[in-house]
């Protein structure tokens, strides 16, 4: 069973931006319900902790004279450890979300730069190649490469690449990919071979080779982001610190809020754990980014370039 997404990244249109600029952004019950589902168990633990502390205070302390931690002190003094560590909670959440967002943005830039390199290659091939089959071959590989990235960095079956490529590559090209241990390297080798077969002047060949190298660099960076998370000792300790802080918070506020404490604790847990959970989810950004739509958009752009080339030939033939 897949992990529930608390949000769904989509390429924004002007309508999306207009909706985001209105007060409707505060009212998203489906997103709120998903967030509750994501943090339900730790939030439940915080609520149970609050109720347990309340029962101890009202029954064990009130009726049977059991010792109470705040005996002889006022609520402000007893809450001092929480007020002095609240800044640490804030800093941990800020650092955690900032680092996760940086990884998310790096992944999005990788996908964007890869598509830009592919568009440049097709544009250059359209202008410089005299051989139509070579141009079509370059266009096919440029369409295929982002789909290979999608299979590589997302939780997809490697065999899916055959199904995806059936409508993009020719049969012999698909057979070539199947034989490759790293299909992306095979695709880059084919593109380099096509540039060599076109027998371009050195400057043009170097320009196209630069775009191929740039595409492979984006693959390398994407693989780095996928294989290397933030240090797990840091992320785990941040989660533990936040949960323990919330579990014991009712001790500091019970004298003030009484039986409202479980509701207040659950409320605080929902928002603080929700922020931490968002950071956890976007730390692995590829399953959140709309990579399939990005690849599809590139496919449409390259098909449009092909039509422009055909239209230009028809005009020349008139």
Image (tube, helix red, strand yellow):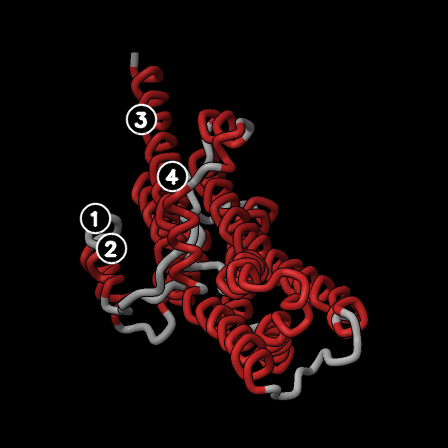
Question: Cβ–Cβ below 8 Å for labels 3 and 2?
Answer: no
Find the distance from the CA under tag 3 to the CA under tag 1.
20 Å
Q: Is residue 38 above or below residue 132?
A: below
SS at mark 3? Answer: helix
Name the residue carrying label 1: 167
Name the residue carrying label 2: 164
Q: Position of residue 230 (x, y in %)?
A: 60, 73
Please tell me which of labels 1 and 4 falls first in the chain: 1
Name the residue carrying label 3: 310
Which mark is in front, 2 or 1?
A: 2
Question: Cβ–Cβ below 8 Å for labels 2 and 1?
Answer: yes
Q: Residue at x 64, y 65 (%)?
A: 96
Question: Cβ–Cβ below 8 Å for labels 3 and 4?
Answer: no
SS at mark 4? Answer: helix
Residue 88 visible at all: yes
Decide: few, some or many residues near mark 4? Use Cα within 10 Å; few <14, some 14-19, many ≥20.
Answer: some
Q: Position of residue 29 (x, y in %)?
A: 39, 43
Find the distance from the CA under tag 2 to the CA under tag 1.
7 Å
Please tell me which of labels 3 and 1 falls first in the chain: 1
* Image quadrant in which you'd find residue 156: bottom left
Please tell me which of labels 3 and 4 falls first in the chain: 4
Find the distance from the CA under tag 3 to the CA under tag 2.
26 Å
Q: Is residue 130 left or right of residue 100?
A: left
Q: Residue at x 36, y 28 (%)?
A: 309
SS at mark 1? Answer: loop
Name the residue carrying label 4: 297
Q: How many marks?
A: 4
């Amino acid at each position: 069973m897949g992990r529930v997404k608390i949000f769904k990244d989509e390429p924004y249109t002007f309508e999306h931006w207009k909706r985001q600029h209105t007060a409707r952004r505060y009212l998203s019950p489906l997103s709120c319900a998903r967030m509750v589902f994501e943090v339900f168990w730790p939030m439940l633990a915080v609520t149970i902790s609050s109720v347990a502390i309340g029962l101890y205070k009202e029954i064990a302390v009130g009726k049977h004279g059991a010792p109470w931690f705040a005996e002889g002190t006022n609520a402000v003094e007893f809450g001092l450890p929480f007020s002095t560590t609240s800044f640490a909670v804030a800093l941990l959440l800020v650092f955690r979300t900032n680092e996760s967002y940086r990884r998310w943005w790096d992944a999005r830039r990788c996908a964007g730069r890869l598509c830009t390199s592919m568009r440049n290659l097709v544009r250059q091939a359209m202008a410089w190649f005299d051989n139509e089959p070579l141009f079509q071959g370059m266009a096919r590989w440029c369409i295929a490469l982002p789909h290979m990235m999608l299979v590589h960095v997302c939780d997809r079956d490697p065999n899916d690449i055959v199904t995806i490529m059936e409508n993009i590559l020719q049969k012999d090209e698909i057979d070539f990919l199947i034989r490759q241990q790293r299909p992306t390297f095979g695709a880059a080798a084919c593109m380099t071979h096509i540039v060599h077969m076109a027998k371009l002047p050195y400057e043009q060949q170097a320009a196209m080779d630069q775009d191929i190298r740039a595409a492979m660099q984006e693959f390398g960076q994407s693989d780095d982001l996928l294989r290397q998370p933030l240090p797990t000792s840091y992320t785990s300790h941040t989660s533990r610190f936040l949960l323990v802080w919330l579990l014991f918070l009712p001790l500091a506020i019970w004298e003030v809020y009484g039986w409202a404490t479980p509701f207040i604790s659950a409320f605080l847990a929902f928002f603080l754990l929700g922020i931490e959970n968002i950071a956890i989810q976007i730390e692995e950004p590829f399953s959140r980014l709309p990579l399939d739509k990005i690849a599809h958009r590139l496919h449409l752009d390259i098909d449009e370039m092909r039509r422009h080339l055909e239209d230009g030939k028809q005009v020349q033939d008139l």
